[in-house]
Amino acid sequence: MRYFEHAEPVITLTAGPVNAYPAVLRGLGRTVLYDHDPAFQLFYERVVDKAQKAMRLSNKPVILHGEPVLGLEAAAASLITPDDVVLNLASGVYGKGFGYWAKRYSPHLLEIEVPYNEAVEPQVVAAMLEAHPEITIVSVCHHDTPSGTINPIDA
């Protein structure tokens, strides 16, 4: 008996699991080139140069060696000081997660959290900013993909 003959399909709206293309599977079977290897460093510099040209940047971009959330944590660590008052808008998994990082770097965290299938209302943010003029940083995940929410940042 096949799965779909006795159960409704489960649609997760996430990035996986997915079937990999044969070329991807072959690539996964190759030897790993580590970041401390001179061959990797040469490869990295070539990719940086190409990215700089493609994006018409005056400075070299930094390509992070890790999963995408590494960039989010790097942003929190680079921008948030212990004196900052952070307003975190949590309308999904990623938005809520950024609040955890913000709390790591500043004890002053305010949060507007809504159900993970709703967007944060701009008037609620405006009211919070008015009530707390000491807020120095506002963090928002524009499109919280696991939750499917899109926050109206243009408002």
Image: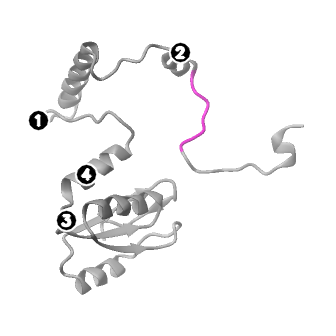
Residue that label 2 marks? 26
Residue that label 1 marks? 59
Give the CA separation, mark 3 to mark 4.
14 Å
Residue 41 picture quarter: top left
Query: What residue sits 60% from the left and 38% below the top?
Result: 17
109 vs 49, left or right, is: right
Circle 1 SS class: loop
Residue 54: percent from left, percent from top: 22, 30
Query: What residue sits 50% from the left and 20% below the top?
Result: 28
Tell me which numbered mark, 1 or 4, is placed earlier along the sequence.
Answer: 1
Tell me which numbered mark, 2 or 1, is placed earlier along the sequence.
Answer: 2
Give the CA separation, mark 2 to mark 1.
35 Å
Q: Closer to the camera, 127 or 76?
A: 76
Q: Amino acid at mark 2?
A: Arg
Residue that label 3 marks? 82
Q: Which residues are magenta?
A: 15-21
Residue 141 appears in the picture as rendered? no
Tell me the crowding category of disc 3: few under 14, some 14 to 19, or many 20 or more residues within 10 angstroms, Cα based. Answer: few
